[in-house]
Amino acid sequence: MQTPSQTLWKSRRGFLLAAMGSAVGLGNIWRFPYVAGENGGGAFILVYLGAVAMLGLPLVIAELAIGRSQRSDPVSAFATLEPRGRFRWVGWIGIAACIGILSYYPVITGWVANYLARTLALALPWNEADAISLDFSAIAAHPGQALLWYGIAIAVATAVVAAGVRNGIEKISKALMPLFLLLALGLAAWGLGNDGAAGALAFIFRPDWRFLALPSTYLAAIGQAFFSLGVAMAVLITYGGYMARDQRLPRAALTIVAGDTAIAMLGGLILFPAVFALGFDPAEGAALAFVVLPQMFAAMPAGIGLGIGFYLLLLIAALTSIIALIEALVAVAVGRWRIARKPAALAVGLAVFMIGLPATLGYGLLSRGDPGTATWLDLADGLTSQILLPLNGIVLALMVGWVWSRARSEEAAELRDAPWRHGWIWSLRIGIPLSILAAMAKAFDLL
Ligand code: TRP
């Protein structure tokens, strides 16, 4: 299938930044440090690095290879992968996972946008009177406001996708990702100078080797690695489809994976020192960003400035991830149903808005009002990350490992002359399917 040149990334750096924007998300800033701390600190991090290198990286390479060699949307890519077209359904699993994430990720993004706006309002004297307190219960108490910011976040992401791969996604990634990195470095430096730094570092990095003997450590590492890299959700296939022939695929994959991992390590230095300085429980997960930090910022002289920087950081992380997920759906609408990009983006944006309504409004109506306890959100997250994502990971690995001939896989991944091509293919053929199966079996108490 021939693609006109305007649907390719304009530059190699543009592709890398867009892919990095997709991978780097809320998972890097709060999920990684917390999961690491809960599962043995430094010992977990070693297992995590192993999971990223041995399972994550091969899958990232495989997805980019599928995307670039088929040059079509993430569903059609599977229809043409094999002459008899028996595997189109594989593409739909990826789409289902993508929709699953989209049913709650934009909701959290809406909170972030809401918090950024409220922090800004506090910083502007003429708004001080109306500034709503930076208290999470305000979100439950003001469903209209939650809805507004949720809608704005989706509208912005949709507009970027509607503008196109080069003029929308690539441009915004080039503008926002360097800013993201600056903010992350600045905030991490601030975190390190904070009273809670020693506690945070000990929590995240101090190894507790006993965890190496627990299956749950490996399970958590694999789950976190896949979520953070954004594999098995149609996105890397979609972005890989816009990748130029002359960009080195293995090196690009390595850059994306290394960048995502580095940002996860950095993420731990941003939020967690404050958690420890204030004596909060790091297990509160998402709540930390919306409960702990506002208290910290409120108590500090330059706190508002830091707050603005922090929510801006989160917003960039989350927005570039939503853009990637929406693009995957739009690619299917454009590629399979021949709908023009703009109307397709509009339809997907509206659909995403509708899907997230239960989780957004669920805060006022269905939950106890604390972030992290919303029933809808937990359900969607559990279903996606514990069932769809691992399942799709297995099938993807088997497709590239067994359905494609070895020569074809190595050709598509540009690994023909790489000494580690054996490691790559056997990871896909055996390593990834078996480790995911074991992890799933364990999770469902079958082992
Ligand atoms: N990787 C993102 C994070 O760390 C979340 C995510 C999961 C994602 N799957 C994705 C983002 C697919 C974009 C595309 O928060």
Image (cartoon, rainbow, N blue to C red):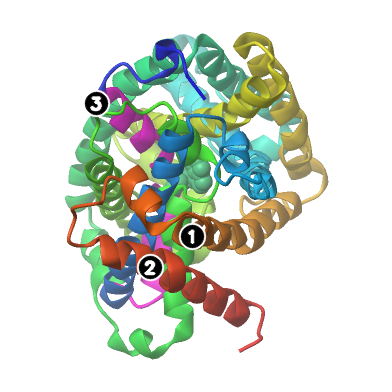
Tell whether position 200 is magenta. Answer: no
Which mark, by number, is residue 13?
3
For the residues labelled 3 and 2, say whether their Cβ atoms are less than 8 Å apart.
no
Q: Which callout, 2 or 1, points at the residue further toward the start of the chain?
A: 1
Rendered location of residue 360, percent (x, y):
72, 37
Q: Main secondary structure of the magenta part?
A: helix
Residue stretch rendered in magenta on the structure: 12-41
10 Å crowding of disc 3: few (<14), some (14-19), many (20+): some
| Amino acid beneath label 2 | Ser
Q: Image point 39% across, 29% down: which residue? A: 312
Viewer-nearest residue: 64 or 222: 64
Please name which of the two marks, 3 or 1, marks the residue nearer to the observer: 1
Rendered location of residue 351, percent (x, y):
75, 27
| Amino acid beneath label 3 | Arg
How many angstroms separate mark 2 from mark 1 (CA)? 8 Å
Which mark, by number, is residue 397?
1
Rendered location of residue 443, percent (x, y):
61, 77
**Residue at image mark 2:** 427
How many angstroms separate mark 3 from mark 2 (CA)? 28 Å
Compared to residue 300, the image places residue 387 above or below, namely below
Is the C terminus in the top left, top right, bottom left or bottom right quadrant? bottom right
Is residue 182 visible in the rendered structure shown here?
yes
Viewer-nearest residue: 114 or 226: 226
Tell whether position 35 is magenta. Answer: yes
Rendered location of residue 30, percent (x, y):
42, 52
